[in-house]
Image (cartoon, rainbow, N blue to C red):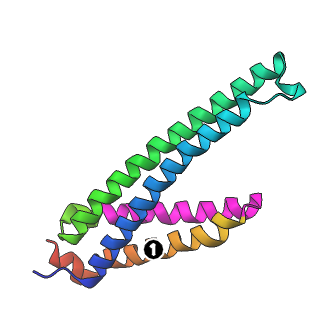
Amino acid sequence: MKTPTSLKINSIIYYIISGLLALLGVLMIIGIIFLGTAMTTSKSSLAIAFGQIINTFVFGIILVAFLFFFIIYAGIAVLLFFMAGGLWKMKRWAVIASGFCSLILFFLGIGTLVSGLNSGIIFPAIIVSPIIIVVSLITLIQFLNKNIRKMIR
């Protein structure tokens, strides 16, 4: 049975998102290296004695947060990579997983849009969130399509 074009498009989109998440993870690691270098080589008056301890503590918190999100992004990237392959081969588990992921991505996109507009961070709010919302809605509509559900049974 031939794979529908919409499933192929979603598969390609998931491959692209997977690659972008992997790239984001690498950029986070590079960013934490630069941040660590900047914080530990500071010679300002704040970095003396007690200020150095606070600097180290703040850097530790930032490092843990970056590593946490790196692990999350890497896990999602691997999941999306395998899901893209499953969609391309019309695997039932991949279509169901893409439906659930698109639902999660939809709410994530709405949350990013709201928090970005509230905090004044324009790039995620204006560029990234609408893309996430549109892709997730396309996937949800496809997930609800009766013809596609018949083909994967």
Q: Image height check: is 51 above or below 30?
A: above
Image position, residue 53 (x, y; %)? 75, 19
Pick the front one: 96 or 22: 22
In the image: residue 1, left or right of residue 76: left
Image position, residue 86 (x, y; %)? 22, 64
The residue located at (27%, 77%) in the rendering is 8
For the C terminus, which image quadrant?
bottom left
Is residue 45 visible from the viewing direction of this image? yes
Q: Image height check: is 68 above or below 141?
A: above
Tag 1 residue: 135
The residue located at (33%, 78%) in the rendering is 9
Image position, residue 3 (x, y; %)? 18, 79
Q: Which residues are magenta?
A: 97-121
The image quadrant of residue 115 is bottom right
Pick the front one: 75 or 104: 75
For the N terminus, which image quadrant?
bottom left
In the image: residue 59, left or right of residue 11: right
Identify the element where label 1 is drawn: helix
Q: Image height check: is 2 above or below 100?
A: below
In the image: residue 115, left or right of residue 68: right
Q: Residue furthest top?
A: 49
Q: Is residue 138 magenta?
A: no
The image quadrant of residue 15 is bottom left
Q: Magenta: predominant secondary structure element? A: helix
The residue located at (71%, 28%) in the rendering is 40
Is residue 144 visible from the viewing direction of this image? no
Three-letter amino acid code at the position of disc 1: Val
Q: Is residue 107 magenta?
A: yes
* Label 1, residues with CA under 10 Å away: few <14, some 14-19, many ≥20: some
Q: Residue furthest right?
A: 45
Pick the front one: 102 or 36: 36
